[in-house]
Amino acid sequence: MGRLHTHRHGKSHTIRPATLRAPSWNTLSPKEIEELVVKYSKDGLSPSQIGLKLRDQHSIPLIKSITKKSLGKILEENNLQAEMPEDLDNIVKKAVGLQKHLKANKGDNRNVRSLELIEAKVHRLSVYYKRINRIPQNWKYKSVVAQLE
């Protein structure tokens, strides 16, 4: 899949397992995997970090194939789901960091465009998450691009 705001292709990604069956080398039961997910979440890891840790340290390529539940569903059942979706939260943090940079570096006009693209992505994601009731309907991201110009 190509990148959203460039002409490049974007080849870097991990490959999901070919089959949805539980791997033969897996020694953990679904209950133990759920306990690991809950433990890591309580330790403060984000869902993507939990998935990486399970993949790298416990040789679990895909949680859903073993537990029959997604990582988000496991967190939701244990009331550990974050208030804000992880991808939206990361993009908002990125926008805030770029805003601080632009306030400190007034002459950096190229990154004003980058901030516009990031904020467009925030707005697209917020519309999606409002539609599926993942964030409140009155949640609003205040744009600062107009204030910079």
Image (cartoon, rainbow, N blue to C red):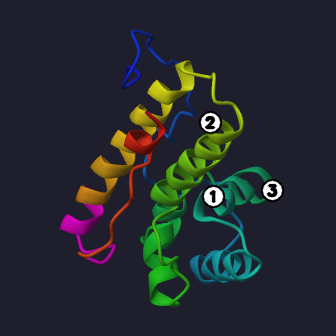
Q: CA distance from mark 3 to mark 1?
A: 10 Å
Disc 3 versus disc 1: nearer the observer: 1
Element marked by disc 2? helix
**First in sequence: mark 2 or mark 1?**
1
Quarter location, residue 30: bottom right
**First in sequence: mark 3 or mark 2?**
3
Element marked by disc 3? helix
- What residue is shown with label 1? 51
Q: Residue lying farthest left?
A: 131
Q: CA distance from mark 3 to mark 2?
A: 40 Å
Asked whether disc 2 touches disc 1, contact meaning CB atoms under 8 Å apart, the reply is: no
Image coordinates of residue 40 in percent, x first then y, are: 73, 75
Residue type of the residue flagged with mark 1: Gly
Q: Is residue 110 above or below residue 21?
A: above
Quarter location, residue 132: bottom left
Q: Which mark is residue 9?
A: none
Q: Residues within 10 Å of mark 1 (few under 14, many from 20)?
A: some
Asked whether disc 3 touches disc 1, contact meaning CB atoms under 8 Å apart, the reply is: no
Q: Give the magenta range.
A: 128-136
- What residue is shown with label 2? 102
Q: Is residue 53 above or below residue 72?
A: above
Q: Residues within 10 Å of mark 2 (few under 14, many from 20)?
A: some
Q: CA distance from mark 2 to mark 1?
A: 34 Å
- What residue is shown with label 3? 57
Residue situated in front as seen by the camera: 36 or 119: 119
Element marked by disc 1? helix
The N terminus - image quarter: top left
